[in-house]
Structures are given as C-alpha cells and as structure tokens.
Amino acid sequence: MRRRDLLKGVGLAAAAVAVAGTGAPAAFAAKRREWRMATAWSRDMDVFWDGLERFSARVFELTGGGLRITPLPAGELAGPLDVFQAVAEGRAEMGHASAYYWADRIPAAQWFSSVPFGMDKNCLNSWLYDGEGLRFWEQAYEPYGVVPLPMGDTGAQMFGWFRKELRSVSDLVGLNLRFPGLAGKVLERAGARVVMLPGQELRDAFASGALDGVNWIGPHHDLALGLAGAGAWYYGPGWQEPSGRMEGLVSRAALEQLDAPQRAALRAAAAETDLWMQARFDAANALSLGKLRGLAGVRVASLPDEFLNRIWVLSREVIDEAAAADPLSARIHEDYMRVWERSQTWNAFSVLNI
C-alpha cells in the first residue's frame, strides 16, 4: 500500500503520529493550539463579528486544524478599552480593536487607525503594505510584546450625530461629545468637552442628553446601535476619520510558539480579513445611508465649508503638536505625511469627481 493511501485510511491523530515518526515536515505534526481573542465588539456588530468568524475559520483551515482561535465579545475577557492590555499581559493570545483606543498609553498608535484629514483606506493600504507603515506599527508595540496585524477598515466614518444644527466651529463650544483619538483633541481645542465611552453606552447617553454629539462608525452600525433618533442631525463628511483601520493584536510569546507555516497562515488570514471587511463596510454603508435618508425626523447633512476650513486649521495644529511631543510619533508622522502628500497629488490628477 502506498503511504498516501495509508494516511487516508487512518484517523487524524494516528496519521499525525505516523508522519511525525517518519521525520516528515513538522507542519503535519504540529501541536494543536487553542487561542482566545479579546475584542472591542459585541456579537451583534455584524461586519466586525462576521469578519472575525471568517478569520478564525480561515486560520483553522490553513493550519489543518492546528490553530483554533475563538473571538470573545467585549466584556467577556476584557472591556473594549482594555483589549491591548489583555494581550500584552497574556490574558488573551490575540485581540481585535482600533489603535487609537490606546492613544494615552502609546501616542504613536493613533497614526495606524485614523488621522483627521489624513489617509483614506486606499492610501493607508499603500503605506502599510508597500511602505514603512507596518514596520513603524510593529516598532510602536514591540516594547509591550504585542505584534499588530492590519485587520479591517470601516472606510470613511461619518462626523456623527448631533442634537443641534452645526453652522460653524463655534457651535461646538460647550458641547459634550464622544470622539476618540486625535479627533477628540481637535474638538477640545474647538471648545467642546470630550469623553470616551464604549459603543454599548452611546445610545442611552445620546438619547438622554448626557451627550450632545456622538461619533460611532458609519450608517450601517449607527443604525444598528439605535442612534437615529427623531430630531437628530447626521453629519458628513468624516473629516476626523477618513479611514478607520482595525488591528489584530497578537501576543509575541504566543506567536513564537507557532511553527512557520502556522505563522504564515495567521498573517494570510488577517490580510484576507482586512480586504473583506473593507469591501463589506463599503457595501453596507451605502445601503444604510439610503435607509437613514428615509427616516422621519432624521436630518442628513454635509458640514458647511466654513466649518471644514476652520476645523482643518485646528487639526493641523493638534497633529503637529502631538507629533512633536513624542520622538516615535515624530518619525511616523514625517513618513505618513510624505506618503499622504504624494497620494493627494496623484488623486487630484487621476480621480474623477462628479
């Protein structure tokens, strides 16, 4: 009997023993591992959750069942703002969230999620996959024993929901707003009070008046969260988040326990998930924007040019100061802006704006 026919006829465990005993490649006899993935999302956030389940299934498939990753909803293993810490401390082998959630701890992290008036998702892809972006990202997380993987992008997020009409930046003075990352710093400079709340608390905070304005993601998940209340203003464009890159967080200690084929499978599945989430968000948000426009009492509007021109000036001030305050951020920002400026020149010449 030929060896490959023998392997077809025995159980998987027996096959592994047989192959290992012959000195065949270790990939066929690798130890099976179970990982937990802490996430910042609830199960009903379908684009995120569907993407993570697809990722986990793909890793399992590519490793021949050698690595099973189980995503856990926010709060089960770690809160939404504690995912990075859970991975860094080894409480989870992996995590999924957005890099600006740890901006207070790692200021440079913000450049890998979103920068006001910065890169859109296509430009960000260029920087991460064809430039120095991913190397800088890895450098920022290296002291914590965490390895980042690009793993999804919401695309441009909307400016968000407000209880009153906005005509100029002065209308933001005194408002209680929920905006993460660098955008929150910009809005503070404009005179707003900014707080950071997890998504699960936003609907009640906005409905009760505790928050005057809320940024979540985009039409699809904003509708699902129940933010579309009567009398609310829904504003675009998403100047504060031209992209919304998500990150897979991997414990370096756990990663080093995998063999080379398993590590390659993990990275390949993350890249597939990155692309799938980008495509899915584009499709879902386009459909959901139409639904929002049809809701009674919801006013979908574009921010006035006066507002955007002034907030652009404030954004440049805040970003330049944030970059200057941290040596790593300064190096990242310099490279980021070099790629961004080149992309703007190309887009201005190549993209048809109808």
Image: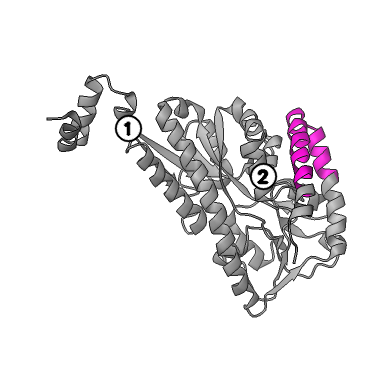
Q: Is residue 26 visible?
A: yes
Quarter of the image for residue 232 reads: bottom right
**Residue 218 colored in magenta in the image:** no
- The residue tagged 1 is 32
Q: Which residues are magenta?
A: 317-344
Closest to the observer: 39 or 21?
A: 21
Q: Is residue 122 left or right of residue 166?
A: left
Quadrant of the drawing holding the C terminus: bottom right
Element assignment for label 1: loop
Instruction: Give the amino acid at mark 1.
Output: Arg
Quadrant of the drawing holding the N terminus: top left
**Residue under the image location 33 percent in, 24 percent down:** 26
Closest to the observer: 277 or 196?
A: 277
Q: Is residue 45 visible?
A: no
Residue 189: percent from the left, percent from the top? Answer: 84, 50
Counting residues from the start of the chain, the first of labels 1 and 2 encountered is 1
Instruction: Give the amino acid at mark 2.
Output: Leu
Quarter of the image for residue 264 reads: top left
Q: Residue furthest bottom?
A: 296
Depth check, mark 1 against mark 2: the one in front is: 2
**Residue under the image location 49 percent in, 58 percent down:** 46
- The residue tagged 2 is 124
Residue 53: percent from the left, percent from the top? Answer: 42, 50
Closest to the observer: 242 or 39?
A: 242
The answer to whether residue 139 is above or below residue 205 is above
